[in-house]
Image (tube, rainbow, N blue to C red):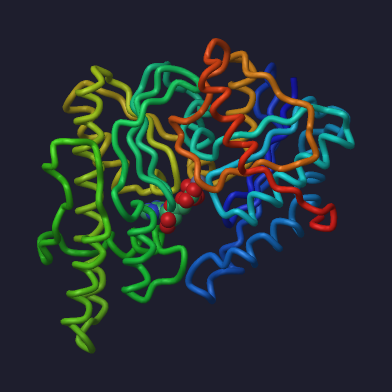
């Protein structure tokens, strides 16, 4: 079975074709970084319009790379949420329209489930169960994962997400959007121990996080330094910031593993690309006889492959794709542990269908 995956929840348009027999056939991605860079962050309206422009050319590119035609697609999967409402609507409208024209079923996918399962696309993928650390621009969560669709949230951020904290702190240091990769490059040459920044909620005794205070601590020091904030200052404080985030993420992840009685940690989401975080998690895992799994770097940030793949796994776990209804039920806010498990989870499925009905939007075909 061939599943087309469509990702459009934020500032990347990603499409991919996944074959349940042969694996990932092809994927294509367009990043809107250049489009939003001059505004220092994602402008939702511009994001939506750009998704509209990119979807059809990217789909053609994926089919060409996979040496397939439209009729080879068996299921159209798309990111239903969470994300920017307008951006999600573009993907949902495109997916529904395509499915109607091909007379094929659709399968909505949870964006974070895509991230969470993306390490399973890599060679040497982990087996269930595992603890997943989801660290993206919009979310920071620790989940106990028993199988596809069986997710229990252990903890999450109480304010900013880790990626958001990276981005906001980078902005304070005058780095371009998106700040995470730029800040981590800057931090490489920073001197350890120059700044003593707080490690929020390190000893809170639970698996929750808080990063807003850390960003504020950097902001206070930047303001105090004023015009004297030279390159040395910026590299040292970038280093201290990254160390604080990495320390909290590492300590809480291993506490969660201990709590769950598990030895496998899966890291997903954009911040999972951070070299220093990987180094710290790998070192801690080695000490404790655990193992950490990451998606390949290209699938750390948003992409279509993770959506096609998550949909394929859900189909294999017994979830059925539905006939396209021609109406779009996007879910800009959608907790991951609110997902139906698949077969045998009638209550949860009903709950999701109800909330989908409530969120249903009629969209005129003029959008495309
Ligand atoms: O998963 P993702 O592509 O989008 C969301 O679903 O949010 O994650 C994007 C986030 C951004 O905040 C970006 O700054 C951060 O991931 N990021 C990084 C690195 N690469 C991306 N943060 C720290 N270090 C990196 N190397
Ligand atoms: Zn994401």
Q: Describe residue 297's horizontal placement relative to residue 322 as left or right.
A: left
Q: Is residue 84 above or below residue 291?
A: below
The outermost residue toward the top is 344
Q: Is residue 145 above or below residue 304?
A: above
Give x and y (percent) for residue 180. 39, 59
Residue closest to the eye, 240 or 81:
81
Q: Residue at x 21, y 21 (%)?
A: 289
Q: Residue at x 22, y 35 (%)?
A: 283
Q: Quadrant of the C terminus?
A: bottom right
Q: Residue at x 55, y 48 (%)?
A: 332
Residue closest to the eye, 179 or 9:
9
Give x and y (percent) for residue 63. 80, 38
Give x and y (percent) for residue 271. 39, 48
Give x and y (percent) for residue 241. 23, 60
Judge whether residue 93 can be spotted in this image.
yes
Q: Quadrant of the N terminus?
A: top right
Which image quadrant for residue 287? Answer: top left
Q: Is residue 146 above or below residue 155?
A: above
Q: Residue at x 32, y 23 (%)?
A: 264
The outermost residue toward the bottom is 227
Q: Is residue 153 above or below residue 231?
A: above
Judge whether residue 306 can be spotted in this image.
no
């Amino acid at each position: 079975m061939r599943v087309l995956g469509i990702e459009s929840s934020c500032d990347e348009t990603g499409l991919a074709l996944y074959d349940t027999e042969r694996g990932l056939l092809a994927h294509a991605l367009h990043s809107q970084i250049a489009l939003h860079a001059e505004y220092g962050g994602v402008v939702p309206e511009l994001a939506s319009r750009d998704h509209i422009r990119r979807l059809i050319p990217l789909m053609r590119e994926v089919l060409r790379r996979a040496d397939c035609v439209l009729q080879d697609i068996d299921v159209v999967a798309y990111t239903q949420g969470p994300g920017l409402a307008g951006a999600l609507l573009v993907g949902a409208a495109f997916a529904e329209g395509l499915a109607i024209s091909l007379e094929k079923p659709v399968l909505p996918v949870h964006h974070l489930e895509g991230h969470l399962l993306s390490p399973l696309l890599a060679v040497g993928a982990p087996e269930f169960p595992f603890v997943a650390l989801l660290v993206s621009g919009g979310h920071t969560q620790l989940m106990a994962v028993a199988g596809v669709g069986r997710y229990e949230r252990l903890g999450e951020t109480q304010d900013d997400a880790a990626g958001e904290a990276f981005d906001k702190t980078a902005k304070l240091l005058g780095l371009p959007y998106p700040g995470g990769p730029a800040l981590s490059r800057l931090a490489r040459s920073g001197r350890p121990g120059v700044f003593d920044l707080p490690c929020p909620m390190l000893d809170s005794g639970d698996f929750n996080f808080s990063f807003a205070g850390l960003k504020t601590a950097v902001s206070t020091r930047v303001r105090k330094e004023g015009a004297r904030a030279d390159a040395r200052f910026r590299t040292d404080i970038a280093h201290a910031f990254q160390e604080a985030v990495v320390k909290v993420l590492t300590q809480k992840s291993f506490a969660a593993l201990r709590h769950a009685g598990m030895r496998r940690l899966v890291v997903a989401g954009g911040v999972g690309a951070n070299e220093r975080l990987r180094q710290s998690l790998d070192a801690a895992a080695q000490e404790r006889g655990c193992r950490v799994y990451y998606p390949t770097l290209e699938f750390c940030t948003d992409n279509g492959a993770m959506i096609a793949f998550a949909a394929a796994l859900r189909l294999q776990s017994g979830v059925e794709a539905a006939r396209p209804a021609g109406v779009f039920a996007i879910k800009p806010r959608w907790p991951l542990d609110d997902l139906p498990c698949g077969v045998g989870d009638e209550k949860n499925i009903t709950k999701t269908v109800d909330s989908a009905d409530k969120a249903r939007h009629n969209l005129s075909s003029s959008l495309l």
